[in-house]
Each structure stands twice: as structure tokens, then as C-alpha cells.
Image (cartoon, coloured by chain):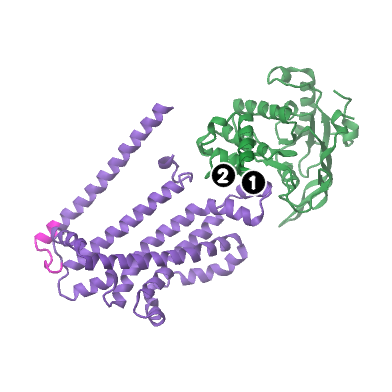
Amino acid sequence: MNAAASKPQVLSVQDLVYAYRTADGEIEAISDLSFAVHEGEFVSIVGPSGSGKTTLMKIVAGLLQATKGSVRILGKPLTGRVPDGVALVFQDYSRSLFPWMTVQRNVEFPLSHRRASRADVAQRSRESLSAVGLVDFATRYPWELSGGMQQRVAIARALAFRPRLLLMDEPFASVDAQTRADLEDLVADVHQQFGTTILFVTHDIDESVYLSDRVLVLSAHPARLLLDREVPLSRPRDQVATRELHDFVRLRAEIAGLILRPGTEKTASSPQDTSPGGR
Amino acid sequence: MATTSAGYARARARAGFRKTIRGVVGIMVALAVWQVLASIGFVRPEWFPTATTVLGDAVALLGQSAFTLQVLSTLYDMLLGLIISTVVAVPLGVLLGRFPLAYRMSSVLVEAMRPIPALALTPVAILLFGLSGATTVSLVVWTSTWPILINSVYGMHSVDPVALDTARSFGLGRWTALYRVALPSAAPFIATGIRIAIGIALAVAVATEMVTGAGSGVGGWIVQASSGGSLIPVYAAAVLVGLVGYLLNYLFERIERRLFRWHLSYRKEGA
């Protein structure tokens, strides 16, 4: 098995089902999904639009209740409450940042209602803002910043929380290509620097391979696990050189085949079957 | 960056100055038309005095403590009523906006009570509170409550669910999220409700005083002054009441602009 598997599980999802009722009856959005994320791992979930990725993130963040199955965070089952130590970065940075607070107040927001000393809060917000390169913008308002900078504020806010598990739901889907590449490298750096465990949702195959230690491929309607594959690429990675590597190209092609030509996938795609040897 | 923002500030100041000039010109034109119409004897001068006569009288009125004390009395009753209705309507509106069932149960009732004019309730108010300032206060409360209540509900409905999800995902409880996220998001809407209420409250306060009479407040003063036969003091007092209303609205707008410069509708001016 892979190197991370020996580390403790931060997230474990077992036989997860999520169904919702419509006028036409019950629709299953997520079907029998099982996977685990280990400490320090960067795991991407990639799948076509409408494959229930956001729903899955909301369930893990405790914002939605699963229909069946179990979700455990650090061994503790989710019981209809928001789990401790989990931070979520939304796709809609402009809507998830609070416009009436300065950048600094936004970053301090998750700490402000906890028992933390004023000095500790200030130090953590400064540390997080410097990790995303926005110390000089602490007194600005989010709406005075560009989209990419706003998303960096959202990332800094999540980092200040010092989450055991950082959930990122298509965080770069609404920024331009150059900003996106910068933000990808920023998140990769943060992962290396803080050892944060990250579960990253995207519909961009390249992005999932480029960023992660492991890629989970989901099908659409309902979401099922098609592939659980370790990424055989060393770190640090490079926006140009890494994407030209044979291993990168091959893995991207394999995932693209699963997502773009559904129906041709093998049914045997449990994690045990597909994980390759170590790096 | 610094030069463009300085240039921007200059351009903004120029635009503000132009706006003021246009407003002043508009008033001057209206006054001139008034002056001409009154001077040519279009209507009998006792009924329709010239602008200069009325304005002169208005300035003179400002110097009379008998009049200014009545203005202060009206303002006091009006502000007291506004404060009471804000204290009642904002929490109520926040709760109605937060709980859809409560909203559905109450919305028809609210819509049915809202159009009842305060003056229609004057006899009831007099019965309850007598010929006193309390009657004025109670009718101001009745009128101001509705716009504040409805805007509070509307403000709560406009709170972005992503913002609430964000708060919840960081472990904020329901009530903390309400206080720290929903209430600030809704605040600009609530303020708009209060500003609308200020405009109507002054009119209702003066009208109530005219009905209850007894010489109290600007309304009472107008009734008493007009019993002398001349309409000039009535016009003069009306001009001053209009001016007070304008100033109140202007002040409140300035406060809104400062507090809510983060809100989409103020960003250009406030940033």
C-alpha cells in the first residue's frame, strides 16, 4: 500500500449514501462511497460536474446529513454536528468572505469566538496572511481585492483555524488561468510547509494530478468511486516541467478516459486493486 | 495607485459639487416661480403669500423660542416613537426572517395592518393616552414599525446562505451565527427601513399634534397660529418642518454611508 496509509486516518468515509427527494421521487446523489484520507495527505476528488462532489464536501464539513453510511473524522463519527478541526474553503470566495470585515478581521473570524488570547489571535492571523502573501493588505476590505487575492484571504482564514483537515471545494474554479496556477502552487506550498491534510475537490483533471498525493475519481449520477490512485510524482512540482512528465501524462489520460468516456470503466476499482507500488 | 486615487477623489469632489449646485439651482427656480405667481396676484395674497414673505417669516420664527420649543417637542416625541418601534420591530423582524413558519403565519396579518393610517387610529390613541405627547408617540410607533419590520425581514431573507454556511463550518452555533453574520448582513436593509420610517414619522407626528391640538408641538402651534386668520405663519412653519425633515434624512444617510460603505450600494462613494 502507499506510504501515507501507515499514518493515522484523518477522515474515513464508509458506505456513504446521500439521497434527496424531488417531485419525481428519491434521487441518489452519492452511492456507496468509501475512502480514507491519512494525516498529511493531499487527496483530490475529481469528477464531472454534478457528480455530487460539493454534496460530499458539505457532508464531511457537517453542513449536510448523510442518508446512510458513516463519516469519521480523527476516529470520531459525525453526529449531525460540525466536526472540530475541519475548515472549508468555498468556491464562492466573494460570498464566503464577510464584506463588512477587513481582511484581518475575516482571517481572525474563526478564532474570535474561541478561547484564544488577543495576542495569540493576532499572531496566528499574521502568520496565515504571510503564508498567502497578503500581510500588506490586512486593513483592506475583501471587495477591494482581486478575485485571486480574495481566495487567498479565504485560504488564510482556513489556515488560521489550524485545521486537522482542510476541505477545498473547487476553490480555483472562478479565477483566471495565471492566478489559478499561482494559487495551486500556493496551496502546494502550504501543504508542505504546515503539513496540512487536504481534501481537494475539482473538475479539472490536470489540477487534481498536479496537486495531489492521491486522486479519487468519481462518476456522476450517482457519485461512485471509479478510481483511487496514488500520484507517482515527486515534490516540489513545477507548473511546466511536472506536466510534461510521462507519469503525469499517463495518469491524466487514464482519468480522462474514465470521466470523458463513461461506461468503459472497469467495475473492479476498489482502492486495493488500483493502488500502485510506493513512489 | 496613489495618484489615481487622488485623482479619483478630486473627480468625486467635483461631481459632488456639481450635484449640490444643481440642487440649489432647482430650488431657486421653484422659488422664483412661486414669487412670480404670488406677485401677479394669481391667487389672493392672504391665501398665497410670496416666497420672500414666507421665507422672511420662517427666519423670524426660528428666533422665537415659543416656536423652536414646539419644534423640539415634536422632534422629541418623534424620536422617542422611532426608538420604541426600532427596539420592537428589529428583533421581531429578525426572528420572522429567520423562521419561515412564523413569517408565513404573520405575513398576511402584517400586510393587513400596515395600510391602516395612523390618523384613523387617533381616537383610539386619544382614548388610551389622552391629549398628550404620548398619543403622538404611540401613533409614530404605529407608523414606523411597519417599514422597519418589513425591511428587517427582507434583510434577513437576503442573507447569503454561503456566508451562513461559512460561519457554521467554523463551528459557530445558530445564535452566534445570527448575531455575528446574519445581523451585520441585514443591517443595511434595516437601516433603510429606519430611514423610510423617519420620513413618515415626522409627518405623522405633526398631523397628530394638529388633531390633538392644545398648542403642543409644531402641529399644535400651526393650528393655533392659523386661528388668527393669516396663513403666512402656516406656510413658514411648513417650510421649516420640511427643512427639518430634509436635515434628518440627510444626517441619517450620512451615517448609513459611513457604516455600510462595505455594502454594494455604497461602495463607489464610500471606498
Question: Residue furthest toward the left?
Answer: B40
* Picture coordinates of residue B54, whole percent (x, y): 16, 61
Q: Nearer the viewer, residue A36 or B62?
A: B62
Report how far apart the C-alphas of labels 2 and 1 lie in the structure: 10 Å
* Picture coordinates of residue B152, whole percent (x, y): 51, 59
Q: Write down the residue under mark 1.
A: B166
Picture layout, residue A42 above or below residue A54: above
Q: Is residue B234 left or right of residue A269?
A: left
Q: Is residue A130 left or right of residue A167?
A: left
Q: Main structural element of the magenta stretch: helix, strand or loop?
A: loop
B36 magenta-colored: yes
Mark 2–mark 1 CB contact (< 8 Å): yes
Q: Circle 2 — which element?
A: loop
* Picture coordinates of residue A190, whole percent (x, y): 69, 29
Picture layout, residue B215 above or below residue A138: below
Q: Which chain is purple?
A: B
Indicate the chain on which mark 1 is placed.
Answer: B
Q: Write down the residue under mark 2.
A: A98
The residue at the point 16 percent across, 67 percent down is B232
Q: Is residue A30 visible?
A: yes
Q: Which residues are magenta?
A: B35-47
Drawing shade for chain A: green
